[in-house]
Image (cartoon, rainbow, N blue to C red):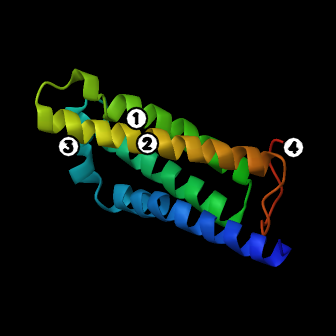
């Protein structure tokens, strides 16, 4: 396989992967009040602050992966955030209404899948196997 093709596809994949995270991060920071209401309904203390913190984390992780600035740290951070968010924000097993349960299950599955993909990226970044990055891995090879 041509290495230029490989590098282009990996970069395109990174771009498509982080599109959701960067957009969500911006949304968390520009629509904090609306999102804080949902966070409060899920039992989070200091919901406005938690929405802002998660917005910064989503944005930082997405930019880290996109530009390849310590992508290992960014991808690992997003993986952890996605797994925590799946459990805390989408606890479908606690729901009694079938429609709400289904919606939360979709959110849970989405977050787990994104966390899994972020873990795969973490391994690639960790072993410095991702082309077109600004820095190497933070945690070393």
What is the spatial separation of the Cα atoms under label 2 and label 4, in whole angstroms? 27 Å
- Tell me, for residue 37, which label it has, or none: 3
Q: Are marks 1 and 2 in contact (CB under 8 Å)?
A: yes
Q: Are marks 4 and 1 in contact (CB under 8 Å)?
A: no
First along the sequence among labels 2 and 3: 3
Q: Are marks 2 and 4 in contact (CB under 8 Å)?
A: no
- Give neighbour class at mark 1: few <14, some 14-19, many 20+ (Cα, 10 Å): many
What is the spatial separation of the Cα atoms under label 1 and label 2, in whole angstroms? 5 Å
In the image as oriented, which residue stretches furthest toward the right?
141
| Camera-nearest label, 2 or 4 | 2
First along the sequence among labels 1 and 3: 3
Q: Are marks 1 and 3 in contact (CB under 8 Å)?
A: no
| Camera-nearest label, 4 or 3 | 4
First along the sequence among labels 4 and 1: 1
Q: Name the secondary structure under disc 4.
A: loop
What is the spatial separation of the Cα atoms under label 2 and label 3, in whole angstroms? 20 Å
Q: Which residue is under mark 2? A: 111
**Residue displayed at 76% across by 50% down:** 124
Q: Name the secondary structure under disc 2.
A: helix
First along the sequence among labels 1 and 2: 1
Q: Which residue is under mark 4? A: 140
> Residue 22 at x, y = what percent?
48, 62
What is the spatial separation of the Cα atoms under label 4 and label 3, in whole angstroms? 40 Å
**Residue displayed at 56% across by 58% down:** 62
| Camera-nearest label, 1 or 3 | 1
Q: Name the secondary structure under disc 3.
A: helix
Quadrant of the rendered structure where residue 26 is? bottom left
What is the spatial separation of the Cα atoms under label 1 and label 3, in whole angstroms? 17 Å
What is the spatial separation of the Cα atoms under label 4 and label 1, in whole angstroms? 29 Å
Q: Which residue is under mark 1? A: 86
First along the sequence among labels 2 and 4: 2
**Residue displayed at 33% across by 42% down:** 107
């Amino acid at each position: 396989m041509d290495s230029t093709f490989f590098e282009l596809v990996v970069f395109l994949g990174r771009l498509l992967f982080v599109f959701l995270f960067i957009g969500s991060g911006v949304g968390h920071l520009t629509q904090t009040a609306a999102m804080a209401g949902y966070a409060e309904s899920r039992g989070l203390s200091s919901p406005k602050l938690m929405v802002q913190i998660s917005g910064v984390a989503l944005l930082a992780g997405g930019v880290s992966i996109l530009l390849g600035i310590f992508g290992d740290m960014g991808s690992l951070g997003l993986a952890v955030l996605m797994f925590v968010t799946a459990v805390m924000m989408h606890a479908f097993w606690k729901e009694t209404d079938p429609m709400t349960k289904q919606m939360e299950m979709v959110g849970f599955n989405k977050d787990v899948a994104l966390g899994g993909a972020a873990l795969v990226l973490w391994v690639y970044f960790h072993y410095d196997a991702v082309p077109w990055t600004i820095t190497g891995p933070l945690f070393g090879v």
